[in-house]
């Protein structure tokens, strides 16, 4: 069984851009890659004094939203990972540490 990680960007365009990030043997590997992509965006956008709400809003607006598909089940975003929840939680952690 394979797990595919895809990133969706340019959310406001008529046709969102989809990028295949990779194919992995386990859900854990796929989740780790998806989380890494989100973390890179959030850390790159963070400015000292920024609120978690603002950082998350930047992610929602401009970040690449990662989704994980399972080849056999054609599952949309496998159980155990939600890009928005992860980004919201990580934004709070990043902004909380910077104080």
Image (cartoon, rainbow, N blue to C red):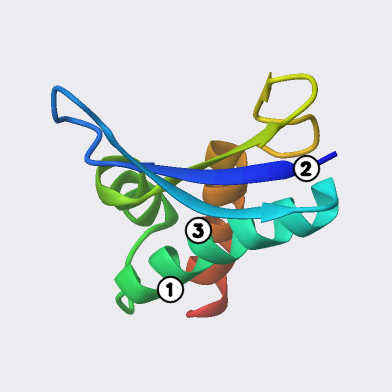
Separation of marks 1 and 2 at Cα, in angstroms: 29 Å
Which residue occupies 51% across, 44% down?
A: 6
> Viewed as shown, does residue 55 lie left or right of 27?
left
Q: Residue 2 carries which label?
A: 2
- x and y percent of residue 31 in the render? 72, 52
Residue nearest the observer in this picture, 97 or 19 = 19
Neighbourhood count class around disc 1 (C-alpha, 10 Å): few under 14, some 14–19, many 20 upward:
some
Q: Mark 1 points at which residue?
A: 43
Q: In this view, does 9 lie above or below 34?
A: above
- Disc 3: which residue: 38
Relative to 32, 72 lies left or right: right
Q: Position of residue 27 (x, y in %)?
A: 82, 46
Tell me what residue is drawn at x 30 percent, y 76 percent.
47
Q: In which quarter of the image is the N terminus?
A: top right
Q: Quadrant of residue 78?
A: top right
**Sequence-earlier tag: 1 or 2:** 2
Secondary element under disc 1, as helix, strand or loop, is helix
Can you tell which of label 3 and label 2 is closer to the viewer? 2
Who is closer to the viewer here, 4 or 55?
A: 4
From mark 3 to mark 2, how far is it between C-alphas? Answer: 21 Å
The disc, 3 or 2, on the residue closer to the chain's N-terminal end is 2
Q: Which residue is drawn at 56% across and 41% down?
A: 83
Q: How crowded is mark 3: few (under 14 residues within 10 Å), some or many (20 or more)?
A: many
Image coordinates of residue 18 in percent, x first then y, are 36, 40
Between 73 and 88, the residue placed more toward the observer is 73
Q: Which of marks 1 and 3 is nearer the N terminus?
A: 3
Q: Is mark 3 on a helix, strand or loop?
A: helix
The answer to whether 54 is drawn above or below residue 72 in the figure is below
Tell us which disc is closer to us: 1 or 2: 2
């Amino acid at each position: 069984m394979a797990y595919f990680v895809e990133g969706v960007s340019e959310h406001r365009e008529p046709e969102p851009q989809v990028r295949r990030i990779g194919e992995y043997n386990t859900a854990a590997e796929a989740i780790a890659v998806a989380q890494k992509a989100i973390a890179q965006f959030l850390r790159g956008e963070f400015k000292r004094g920024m609120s978690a709400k603002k950082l998350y809003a930047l992610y929602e607006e401009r970040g690449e939203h990662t989704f994980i598909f399972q080849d056999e089940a054609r599952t949309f975003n496998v159980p155990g990972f939600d890009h928005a929840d992860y980004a919201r939680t990580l934004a709070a952690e990043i902004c909380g540490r910077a104080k």
